[in-house]
Image: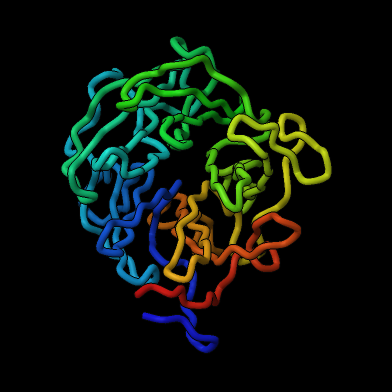
Amino acid sequence: MKSSSTETFENPVFEPIFADPTAVRTDDGTYYAYATEDDWHDGNGTQLVPIVKSTDFVNWECVGEAFEKRPEWKEYGNIWAPDISKYRGTYYLYYSVSTWGGSNPGIGLATADSPEGPFEDRGKLFTLDEIGVENSIDPFFYRDGDTPYLFWGSFHGIYGVELTEAGFDVAGEPFQIAGDAFEAAHILRRDGAYYFFGSSGSCCEGMESTYRITVGRADSLNGPYTDGEGNHLLNQQGRLVVGGTEQFVAPGHNTVVTDDTGDDWLLYHAYEDPNYYHEGILRRALMTDKLVWSDDFLHVSERNPSKEVPVPTVE
């Protein structure tokens, strides 16, 4: 499918629920996305990290779950905010295990030869008590040259740490790149600069939620990340990428993917009014919007979620 000025599609692109999306593109051009565990109330029970795929980035179909059973390294907790990457020829899925307000959340790793799994749990990377960072959830894997890193954190600072070459263990000391305003780190490198995306505000209060995505820029992976006006993201919230509207509330927890013309696209979740409840539960559907450039920063056009979106170029 090739895009033109007349081809559009509508948000959301997958529903009823697909919170905290992460995505990867395979060698054959197929996109795969993964989300926080949820019960879709379709009679099949809880989806332990649902997986959807698309060949055109517009039409998505569910192909299963990443986990056949819950990881056993933590006694209790839900699987939140996974992060997918292809690394060393294998699909790496870092994930959080926590409960709402849990005292000792942690991050684990599962791997698979195929993006559809089955994923083999490799166990714990660390917990809050071991790494010393409050609310240690929302992992994001990033390889800077040949060095792998993990970034994570939720409203108690965003931190990074160097990993061993295999990515199974921590190899360095944590360093902070952003302040208490953020969770759901995502980093993109373009034209020699690093762009940190983070979600701020409240995520899970229905139409009262204030979630939004902002961005900062740095010359090195470790920062300092600023809003372009000298304000450091340790103390400021960065430039707005996308905020809520009356129709689409609380856009957040994004990933960035690229189409075949090199355009960048934001995948994220949001509530859609008046359908934000599904079978009595909060419904965060999968959304996408094209990223545009302004003053060397990326944002969604008009900085609001779009109902009608131009079709990406996917060949």
Name of the residue lying farthest toward the right: 229
Q: Which of 72 and 151 is in front in this view?
A: 151
Q: Nearer the viewer, residue 97 or 265?
A: 265
Q: Is residue 295 visible?
A: yes
Image quadrant occupied by the C terminus: bottom left
Horizontal and vertical percent position of residue 85: 35, 43
Please name the residue shown 49% across and 81% down the image. 8
Please name the residue shown 62% across and 35% down the image. 220
Image quadrant occupied by the N terminus: bottom left
Residue 242's quadrant in the figure?
bottom right
Q: Is residue 93 above or below residue 190?
A: above
Residue 104's quadrant in the figure?
top left
Horizontal and vertical percent position of residue 168: 31, 23
Please name the residue shown 50% across and 30% down the image. 152
Give the side of residue 155 with respect to residue 67, left or right: right
Q: In this view, does 41 lie above or below 147?
A: below
